[in-house]
Amino acid sequence: MTEPNLDLLVPAYVREFEPYIPSKPDPELQRLYGCDRLYRLNNNENPLGPPPGAQEVIRGFHPPRGAVYPSGDSYYLRREIAVRHGIDPDQIVVGNGANEVIAFVIKAFCGPGDNIITADKTFAVYEWVAVFSGIEARVVPLKEERFDDREMLQRIDNATKVIFLCNPNNPTGTYWSRDTLKAVLDEVGGRQIVVVDEAYFEYVEADDYPDGISLIKDYPNLVVFRTFSKMYGIAGLRIGYLAGDIKVVDMIRRTCVVYSVNGLAQEAALACLRDETGHIRRTRELVREGKAFLCAEMSAMGLPVIVGEGNYLIVKLKGSDTLAYRKLMHEGIMIRPMTGFRYPNHIRVTLAKMDAMEAFVAALKKILA
Amino acid sequence: MPVATHCVETAAKAFGLGRDESLKLSLATEEIFSYLSSNVCRGESVDIRCVNGLSYVRVEFRFSVSALDMGALNIAASVTCDNDDDMPEMGLAIASRTIDRLNIMAERQNRVCLAIEKDKDYPSVPETPLPPAVVKGLLTAETPDTEGVKIYVTRVNQGPPDPLRPPFFQYPGKVADMVAAGDCQIVTAVDARGECAGGVLFRFRTARIVEVFGPHVFCPAREGEIADMLLTACIARIARTKAIGIVNLTGMPLSVRGQYELLGSLKYSGDDGKSFVRSWYYRLLHEDPGYLVFTDAILKEYLEGEFKRLFLAREIRDVHDQGEIKEVASIFSTEMLREGSTAVLSPLWPGADLDDNVKRHLRFLKDEAINNIFFNLDLGIYWHASLMRVLIDNNCRPALIIPFGAQADMLIFQYDRTEP
Ligand SMILES: Cc1ncc(COP(=O)(O)O)c(C=O)c1O
């Protein structure tokens, strides 16, 4: 048997890349950490689950349909999204989670020598996909926990192809207002693609928060990401999408693999959009309650928080966040340590139901005692 | 052979190594080359590469080894266990005497890389001290230029003496070259006028572990603030790299100690015969995904206690010798660090002769007057567990665990020199 020579076969930027290790399944973690229940406060999931209509779709999935390929380009779902936003279905590409469409965009626009611009403390996948594709990722430090518009514009050069904005930002909850976003788009003037990742769009209640999709007609270099993983509670089914100008999306579509989105996810997503039972309102209420509770508790404990839009907040600890992770895991609480987001000593907590919030506070008090 | 040594000598000089050092390096090359070709890879080709590390010159020998000749890679290969006066040719050992570092690493595809390094000489810190730093107002963390590196190093030297600080801190020019070669990074805290209020130096100690020196603070009145800012900047720079943990062995101000976990300590004895203790502080950069580790029953309780203390989720599995057939000759890769008189041994290959081989290595290293001997076991590799009992029987004790220091956690054994 001759082993392949991986040093020759694999490009250096792949060899050097450190693969992300996802957490083990809950039962394994519970066994390893010796806890009999686990509150998942690490992934910004919706504890209410999907809206009732989507639950019905999932329950009703007819097993023999497992044998049949889904719509290869999420035909009905794109039509529904298009109608809701007054755009053409061909302005939409659906992916296996918003994560997948990040890769589509980078593949479509970036070649050797090109770069992308994003922030240092934001969702890591833009940077990861760029780096393991051999594309330089320029990470601009946040300014007062916000994406620094001036500095990001400064960093643009001839090789810059895509600018990634996370709006609102995961993990800080800050956002660019409509005016700020438009000012940046005006300045970029179509020379680069500007991606606005609106994974947490449905959580935002602020009046000056922009709906990116409504700006596409004025800014054809704007590409917007949405996901069904957060507010709509079907993270487990893996579905998200991007929207943009029809010519731009026509290019992006060339880099995407059709049939990557399963049929159940497509139908459940459709049902999510058609929800009329007040799922978004209920979820927002839950988040509001959790946010108020945690802010008060953290303040009483003398721990600063970074909180804004979205179903999460950051707590600043006095010591190591990764140690706090391990200690909290032993108490059955899973949070996200923020070192990987370049926020050492900070943890991010998903805002969830009150029993989970209370359990988190009790465990935090215990481990800091 | 004359080609190899001539090449190395010429390259070493071209890379700026002094006359003496170049000669020593080429002598070691000669010794190793002839040893390899007569004992390790007879008739096979050996690739020799000379690398300019800026502050050192490195010669790498790459070759394939057949299982039969692997045993010759043990640095103590030609040492016998009990017979004192019999010390025949020992090429690797002789070579290791004239250079600063020797290291043997297994690479992909049965390839082995044996590397030797010789350091350049640098002038030490200037006699006339810098005036005390006068720092005002807001500070920012930045990557210093060469001048900034030298000022930082000079100021570290002017601070309180620290016996644990590595000697390279005495040579500002050397550190500047180390930075330029990518061997380490520095972040400094500077005020609006560019005055340096402190700094931190860090480098990869293994593929996954970064060693942090400092943060050193030159403005005691603002120590807490400056140390915290430097450590945060340092971690932010390594947070999305291959690094999985950081260790700090020297220079850490009290104010940031709470950000670390104490792993334990190792005892060292210095060249002057005095011994000192080095505490290992650690910080994991990732979530602990939980892991399976292997142990001999003799250390199960110790491991359980340590993992509990460190809040690490580990499934500990016992490994038993059940009489299965083993390779004849085991192999240890040896890292010889003349500076600090240290040898670090890691098992590369299992074998039936583990006990003899450990004895041979200990005897050889004692004869070489190496003061500090460590064995690094990988708790994720099942057969390393079979060494635990052997090491304990040979006066080594488990000293500390570096989480994810190897494939899984690394367990460091320290050889106890006070043995009878
Ligand atoms: C900002 C942001 N974008 C994208 C994603 C990925 O979402 P998906 O589950 O649709 O892949 C997440 C999920 O954590 C996110 O936080």
Image: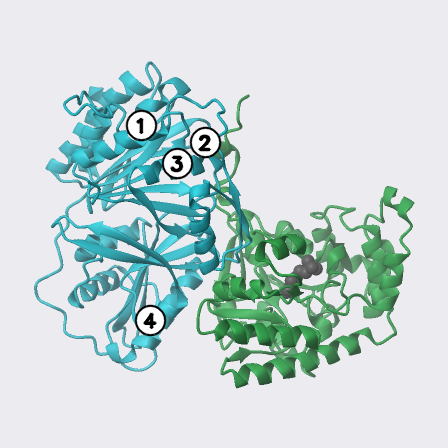
Chain colours: A green, B cyan
> Does the CB distance between marks 1 and 4 fall below 8 Å?
no
Using the image, name the chain to which the residue with label 1 belongs: B
Is A91 on the left or on the right of A58, as rendered? left
- Which mark is first along the chain, 3 or 1? 1
Left or right side of A188 for B395: left
Find numbered disc 3 in the image and state the secondary structure of the residue it sits on.
Answer: helix
Q: Chain of mark 3?
A: B
**Which residue sits furthest top?**
B43
In the drawing, does residue A337 fall left or right of residue B350?
right
Kind of residue at badge 1: Asp
Could you classify mark 4 by the number of other residues whose Cα lies within 10 Å: few (under 14), some (14-19), or many (20 or more)?
many
In the picture of the structure, the residue carrying the numbered disc 3 is: B387
The percent coordinates of residue B45 (x first, y second) are 35, 19
Tag nearer the camera, 4 or 3:
3
Q: Which mark is residue A183?
A: none
Q: Amino acid at mark 4?
A: Ala
Disc number placed over residue B227 in the picture, else none: 4
Q: Earlier in the sequence, mark 2 or mark 4?
A: 2
Query: Distance of mark 1 from mark 3, alpha carbons?
Result: 12 Å
Evaluate whether label 2 is on the same chain as label 4.
yes
Residue with the mark numbered 1: B356
Q: Are marks 4 and 3 in contact (CB under 8 Å)?
A: no
Instruction: Please name whichever residue, B412 or B245, is drawn nearer the observer in this view of the structure.
Output: B412
Amino acid type of the residue that numbered disc 3 sits on in the rendered structure: Leu
Residue A67, quarter of picture: top right
Closer to the camera in the image, B305 or B166: B305
Which residue position is annotated with label 2?
B108
